[in-house]
């Protein structure tokens, strides 16, 4: 059996593109720690850094046939990790902005809608609409908002992609909003409050 640890990155990349799992494992073992350290320094969050590196290697394997390195393998991995970290930071900032926007929205709104129904009635109405969602969408939504699982955890549990999880949650919020005739900002805040 070949000693993969003696192979160059170019050889490992060629084997990877051919679907060689041992070559993939060698690349993973060779670069995981370096990539994790880089992501952790930028994010200062252990679980986020692990998620990004894991996602990077999943993508490396699933899209191995499409890979076209303009640089070395290590350069490609480093640049890809850095892009993923920057995207995560942007999302984090956008999430913080969303909370600020929702707080401002609630303060500025005419509360007549909320005054017409009690908090309990609103929670019951939202729960009823959640139960009326299509089965898979409801399952994803409940894992997210009631079991507090991350998109990655839901994806792993249900055997679907993170992207599908995100889309299902977004669609569920749209359906509930339309059924209850409430604005997007208000329905997001209400779901957050009732299922926190």
Image (cartoon, rainbow, N blue to C red):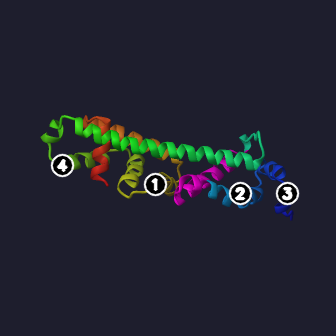
In depth, the one of 192 and 91 nearer the eye is 91
Q: Secondary structure at mark 2?
A: helix
Residue pointed to by mark 1:
150
Q: CA distance from mark 2 to mark 1?
A: 25 Å
**Disc number for residue 31:** 2
Quadrant where the N terminus lies?
Answer: bottom right
**Percent x, y of residue 33:** 67, 61
Q: CA distance from mark 3 to mark 2?
A: 14 Å
Name the residue located 84 percent from the left edge and 51 percent from the top edge: 11
Q: Earlier in the sequence, mark 2 or mark 1?
A: 2
**Percent x, y of residue 119:** 18, 49
* Label 2: few (<14), some (14–19) or many (≥20) C-alpha neighbours in 10 Å: some
Q: Which residues are magenta?
A: 39-64
Residue pointed to by mark 4:
119
**Disc number for residue 2:** none
Name the residue located 85 percent from the left edge and 57 percent from the top edge: 7
* Label 4: few (<14), some (14–19) or many (≥20) C-alpha neighbours in 10 Å: few
Asked if residue 125 is among those painted magenta in the image, a careful observer would answer no
Looking at the image, residue 129 sits to the left or right of residue 8; the answer is left
Mark 4 or 2, closer to the camera: 2
Q: CA distance from mark 4 to mark 2?
A: 52 Å
**Are the two marked residues, 3 and 4, in contact with CB atoms closer than 8 angstroms?**
no
In depth, the one of 80 and 142 nearer the eye is 80
Q: CA distance from mark 3 to mark 4?
A: 64 Å
Quarter location, residue 22: bottom right
Q: Earlier in the sequence, mark 3 or mark 2?
A: 3
Quadrant where the C terminus lies?
Answer: bottom left
Q: Earlier in the sequence, mark 3 or mark 1?
A: 3
Asked if residue 59 is among those painted magenta in the image, a careful observer would answer yes
* Label 1: few (<14), some (14–19) or many (≥20) C-alpha neighbours in 10 Å: some
Q: Secondary structure at mark 1?
A: loop
Q: Earlier in the sequence, mark 3 or mark 4?
A: 3
């Amino acid at each position: 059996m070949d000693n993969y640890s003696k192979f160059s990155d170019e050889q490992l990349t060629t084997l990877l593109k051919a679907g060689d799992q041992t070559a993939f494992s060698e690349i993973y073992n060779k670069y995981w720690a370096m990539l994790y350290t880089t992501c952790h320094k930028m994010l200062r969050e252990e679980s986020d850094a692990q998620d990004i590196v894991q996602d990077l290697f999943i993508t490396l394997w699933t899209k191995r046939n499409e890979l076209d390195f303009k640089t070395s393998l290590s350069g490609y991995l480093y640049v890809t990790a850095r892009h993923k970290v920057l995207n995560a930071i942007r999302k984090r900032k956008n999430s913080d902005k969303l909370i600020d926007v929702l707080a401002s929205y609630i303060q500025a709104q005419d509360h007549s809608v909320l005054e017409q129904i009690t908090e309990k009635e609103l929670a019951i109405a939202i729960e009823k609409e959640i139960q009326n969602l299509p089965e898979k969408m409801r399952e994803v939504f409940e894992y997210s908002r009631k079991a507090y699982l991350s998109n990655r955890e839901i994806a792993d549990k249900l055997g679907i992609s993170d992207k599908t999880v995100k889309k299902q949650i977004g669609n569920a919020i749209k359906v509930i909003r339309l059924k209850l005739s409430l604005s997007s900002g208000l329905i997001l805040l209400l779901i957050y409050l009732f299922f926190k």
